Amino acid sequence: MALEIVLITGMSGSGKSVALHALEDAGYYCVDNLPPELLPAFVALEHRHHGHRLAIAMDVRSATSLHQVPQELTRLRGEGVAVHSIFLDATTDTLVRRFSETRRRHPLSHTDLQQGRQALVQTIEVERELLAQLREQSHVIDTSAIRASQLQSYVKSLMATAAQGQLTLVFQSFAFKRGIPMDADYVFDVRMLPNPHYEPALRDLTGLDEPVAQFLRQQPEVALMQAHIAQFLTHWLDMLDRNHRSYVTVAIGCTGGQHRSVYLAERLADAFGDRWTTLRRHRELDGK
């Protein structure tokens, strides 16, 4: 069997331990905070002793040698190893809040737990710079507005589709009022479309419910928006695939992330499911 490696990296406080636990539950042999210098020897050793599915977490604690990782991953891919790199991110405000709530010190901080917000923000920005190259070469998951259970589900679904060996389209609905997902490759704003929220019988339903779907199907503007998004994606997806992209995240946003964006994410996933592997995420609904 071919060796499969999942590399989990990302910002401190973004949920790497949660992601690693999800992979452990899925049957991967996992190790946390492996120094990059040990990656070649570790991969060879564990391949002999623990099977074919490894998950490795690395973070900024290995800052002085992180620059070695992209080159090593390229080497492993050249040897036929299936390498999947996931980068967990979150907004700076979210990371500051998490560190404040847990009373943990940032790995790059040289001050005590009473460090001020400004110092912590500066430390987080330094970390972003150190991890920028790894982020660029990874599939990014924004954990700012999702729960631990959502992150676990997202990671498991990504690895399930990775086994199919082709580009995966992730259609994600979201609410603009809670922020644009940082992991989106493309963002489409559908707030100008007719809103089921103003229909009393539909207000408490979602875009997954047939009455809402029926209402939106009757709106010409909705069909036109769907066609335009589909046309754009159809034009560029083959080129993205030839560029060796493993995942493309398409975010559809409306005001509350409940009706219009959910409906369009579902319809687009249906439309592209015959040609590409598709995943569906509804950020505001999945967290309920």
Image: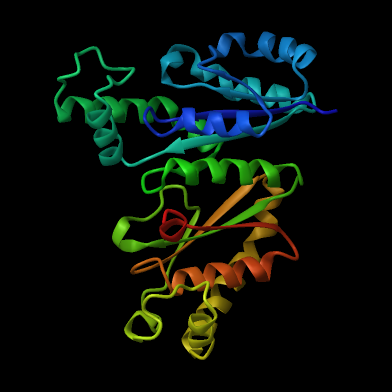
Q: Residue at x 46, y 22 (%)?
A: 59
Q: Quadrant of residue 176?
A: bottom left
| Image x and y of residue 146, in percent | 41, 47
The quarter in which the C terminus is drawn is bottom left
On the picture, is 120 further left or further right than 139? left
Q: Is residue 133 visible?
A: no
The quarter in which the N terminus is drawn is top right
Label total for image: 0
Decide which of 239, 49 is in the foreground and name it: 49
| Image x and y of residue 245, in percent | 64, 46
| Image x and y of residue 15, in percent | 43, 33
- Which of the colour schemes (rainbow, by chain, secondary structure, one colour) is used? rainbow
Q: Residue at x 55, y 29 (%)?
A: 21
Q: Is 103 placed above or below 160 here?
A: above
Q: Is 247 placed above or below 254 here?
A: above
Q: Residue at x 24, y 12 (%)?
A: 110
Q: Is residue 287 visible?
A: yes
On the picture, is 218 further left or further right than 192? right
| Image x and y of residue 211, in percent | 50, 84
